[in-house]
Amino acid sequence: MNYVSTENWKFMRYTIKYLFVLLLALPFQGMAQQAPVLPLDSILQRVDRNNILLQSYALKAEGYKYSADAATAWMAPMVGVGTFMTPYPGQMIMEGRDKGNLMLQLEQDIPNPAKLAAKKKYIASQGNIEKATRDVTLNDLKAQAKRLYFNWLVAKQRIAVLRENEKIMVTMKKIEEVRFPYNQSQLSGVFKATAKIEDNHNMIRMQEGTIAKAMSWLNSLMNAPGNQAFDIDTTYQPSFEMAASYDTAALATVRKDVIKMNEGIHSMQLNIESMKREKKPDFRFRFDHMYPLDASMPKAFSAMGMISIPIVPWSSKMYKSEIKAMQYNIQAMEKEKSAMLQETQGMLYGMQYEIQSMEKRIKAMEEKIIPALHQTLDANFLNYQENKLALSNVIDSWEALTMMQSNVLDEKLKLYEMIVDYEKQLYR
């Protein structure tokens, strides 16, 4: 017996020691596996830095830089070897000079430097358009990231509300289970409470799905694996910051699409300047060297310089018509830009008033309606505990409160998305 007791005691000591070490290790294991918390600013910076689509615009802009350098290159020289004034076989040759010559020919086109410089500036300006396009795309991606972040944030708040309200329903279910054996409640009340609890669980699962979807999409925007786990800053509170001015001149300096349009107009102006240079002449140099097939004849050469005459009517018609067409296009783009700024100004005023109205509605719901529903539920629950009120009445109060809290979160999500749309239109 003593031997058995000793073995049991050793086994218990070993088990207690193992459990103690395991309990000490659990917090550190949890810390090691805890997902990092990413604030909204950090996510937006990662989108700006890592998004693959945005990287493509930088590569395109770099490509235009090299294309601009290539525009200043000259055509390769042409070298030719052949015969000159050589008689056909079988012809009678009267003198030695009639034997002809072996000719070496060198030809080089020399483009006008002003033309090359103007063309280089025009092509280089295409890179600036790509950079402006990147800013427009970045603004769209930031708006998309903010929507996902706010959906995640509201889903977290919904889960917190659902879990808090579930505690009340679980308590009522327990009360019903205790009262049933004493015929103080009906079995249907237990089943109804159980159904409400399971329905609450389904609502939580739905919000968890929303969170998983937002996490995957945000990872894709940040060029990270879709299943990479992270969490958001649940203390973040989106706020509406009204612009200092909606003047069209001020909007033109911050809206990315207007900046892109300005770059497009500037590029077309440089193209017009390039087309105007088409009236300047180009040059060509040609040198011929002849080796006579008769040794008594002297070696000879021919040097020739040529110049184009682009001002003749049948040639100038091309670049003059192109210039006119681009000038009209620039005027059309200026009108389009003005219309866009005017439309944006009215849109921003409308969005501002809508956001302010939504904020007042949410404030009234949070400060007046929800507290009143809370008080109703508390009073009904107290009467229910004292067996003065039926379970169905308490469930009605619970559902009214839960629905109103859900409506508030719906309105908050709409408000957050309206703020995102406002910022997107302001800086688009």
Image (cartoon, rainbow, N blue to C red):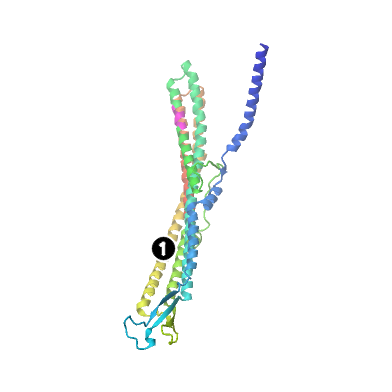
Location of residue 222 in the rendering, given as x and y in whole percent from the top left corner: 51, 48
**Residue 193 is covered by the magenta coloring:** no
* The quadrant where residue 395 appears: top left
In the foreground, 355 or 96: 96
Residue wearing tag 1 = 336
Give the residue drawn at x 49%, y 54%. Answer: 54
What's drawn in magenta, residue-wise? 195-201
Vertical placement of residue 9 versus 370, above or below: above
Work out which quarter of the rendered image holds the N terminus and state it: top right
Location of residue 8 in the rendering, given as x and y in whole percent from the top left corner: 64, 17
Give the residue drawn at x 48%, y 69%. Answer: 120
Location of residue 384 in the rendering, given as x and y in whole percent from the top left corner: 49, 24
Q: Residue furthest top?
A: 1
Residue 35 visible in the picture: yes
**Residue 198 is covered by the magenta coloring:** yes
Residue 280 visible in the picture: no
Callout 1: SS = helix
In the foreground, 131 or 311: 311
Location of residue 114 in the rendering, given as x and y in whole percent from the top left corner: 48, 75
Give the residue drawn at x 45%, y 62%. Answer: 261
Vertical placement of residue 239 versus 81, above or below: above
Q: Amino acid at mark 1?
A: Glu
- For label 1, count other residues whose C-alpha is less than 10 Å away and answer few (under 14), some (14-19) or many (20+): some
* Magenta stretch: helix, strand or loop mostly: helix
